[in-house]
Image: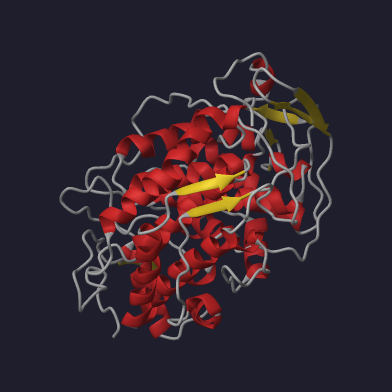
Amino acid sequence: MTPVTSTSPFSRRTLLKATGAAGVVTGTALLAPPAARAAGSAYAHPGLLHTSADLARMRAKVKAGAAPYTAGYAKLTANRHAQTGWVANPQATIYRGAGSPQNYTILYNDIHAAYQNALRYQVGGDDAHADTAVAILNAWSGKLTQLAGSADRFLASGLYGYQFANAAELVRGHGDFDLGRFQEMLSKVFGTPADDFLVRHNGAVDSNYWTNWDLANMACVLATGVFCDDRAQVGRAVDYFKGGVGLGAVRNAIPVVYDDGLAEWLEAGRDQGHALLGVGLMGTFCEMAWNQGIDLYGYDDSRFLKGAQYVAKWTMGGEVPFTANTRRKGAVGGWSGAETVSRAAGVDPAMMRPIWAMIANHYTKRRGVSASYLTQIAAKAAPEGGGGDYGPNSGGYDQLGFGTLAFTREKGAAVEPSASASAARSDPRPQTAASASASASPSTDGDLAATGSGDLVGWSAAAGVSAVAGGLLLLRRRDRVRRGAAE
């Protein structure tokens, strides 16, 4: 049964509790109006990576046989996770990291099955896919109680927390979905450790963790806050993006802006895989914020655009400038060290992750700006798949994917972000800086999300640099004392 309206996708069950208006056609563009907010909700639902208008666009385009939506949908329907035969395997404790009986592969496979079945339902309309997604989500919220392992448990809190929230957001109005129990599990098992990570970083100095660790947990805090209608939690995530002391804050993740309009991505000095992961996570963060009326894509003169363009050019084999930086690492009150990175790492132009369609379409279609490197790499990556299409290791499951289907847009005039009825279109709160620090654990499986014990960062400006925002941040804070024991 096809969901025929954006306000009633669960036509044979309890309707979605909060819905958005259908897209409004202006000229040739399908533009998203402000999303509607249900009584008692602080935020619009669905309102994480996908709004009601987004889902209506996907349905209409696939039904019409329009390219490239059909190719994107074919990637979804072909994925083994997107099938109604998927049976959840919930665990009480999820372990990630050395020294524990790691079972986190069970979790991320089930999350991607829930998300893909939920998305497949929203686009194709078969109730069995919604039922499958709900069964997976209910099974986990009824059993999972904690995350454990090494410091890598904070990768689990961040990555799987934001993904869980997005899967559940697509079926939150299903009559069989235990919304309250899932909100409690999401908040306690994922949101709480993610919040704590951004404050304490597992007892390490502020710059110990590379950018992707912060960004994963920022995405979790934001997604959990929206899903659970927690304004304070959303505020903490947004404040951290703007002024956090860790490497996920936008000026630390992208420390140098060059005169040519590119901006150095910090983890380009580390390796290509983690740089791609970080860009994908920052894009995810910005998209979820945008869908609640907060424009972080354009924050600080579109700093993320410049960083994403830099990574796109570099990962396609282009020459990019690089300013040497030094990162402090170690535990507060314990061992310490530093490492200087002086050049961008080597790349494999064939390495792809499903991150580019969302970012390229925002800037070139929503905003109508030129972004040649994003345009090129998005075309090269299309049609984007999802978890299970990019290898068997956890790095292939760090993004939910299917951007060709979900984020392809028609070009139109610049638009404001969608917003709930009560949300401001710009964030009016004081830009207070959240605190942070962290410790690293060795990568043992080539996982894109893992970090090594030799990780580091700080900054030094060089000739030809037009702006270095936060360039001395880490060094200025080198004597900062944080609470918490080192792991």
Residue found at the very far left of the displayed protein? 39
Residue 68 in sight here = no
Q: Is residue 67 left or right of residue 288?
A: right
Please tell me which residue lies in front, 429 or 75: 75
Closer to the camera in the image, 464 or 211? 211
Where is residue 228? Give x, y as percent.
Answer: 31, 47
**Residue 272 against residue 176 in the figure, above or below:** above
Q: Position of residue 316 (x, y in %)?
A: 76, 59
Residue 328 in sight in this render = yes
Q: Position of residue 233 (x, y in %)?
A: 37, 37
- Whether residue 243 sits left or right of residue 9 in the image: it is right
Q: How far across and how far down the image is residue 427, in percent?
A: 36, 35
Residue 84 position (above or below residue 20)? below
120, 128: nearer the viewer: 128
Q: Residue at x 23, y 58 (%)?
A: 18
Quarter that holds the N terminus: bottom left
Residue lying at the far top in this picture: please name it.
479
**Total label count?**
0
In front of the other: 416 or 214: 214
Give residue 475's quadrant in the image.
top right
Residue at 28%, 65% in the rendered image? 177
Q: Residue at x 64, y 32 (%)?
A: 487
The colour scheme of the drawn protein is: secondary structure
**Residue 187 occupies quadrant:** top left
Q: Residue at x 63, y 57 (%)?
A: 374
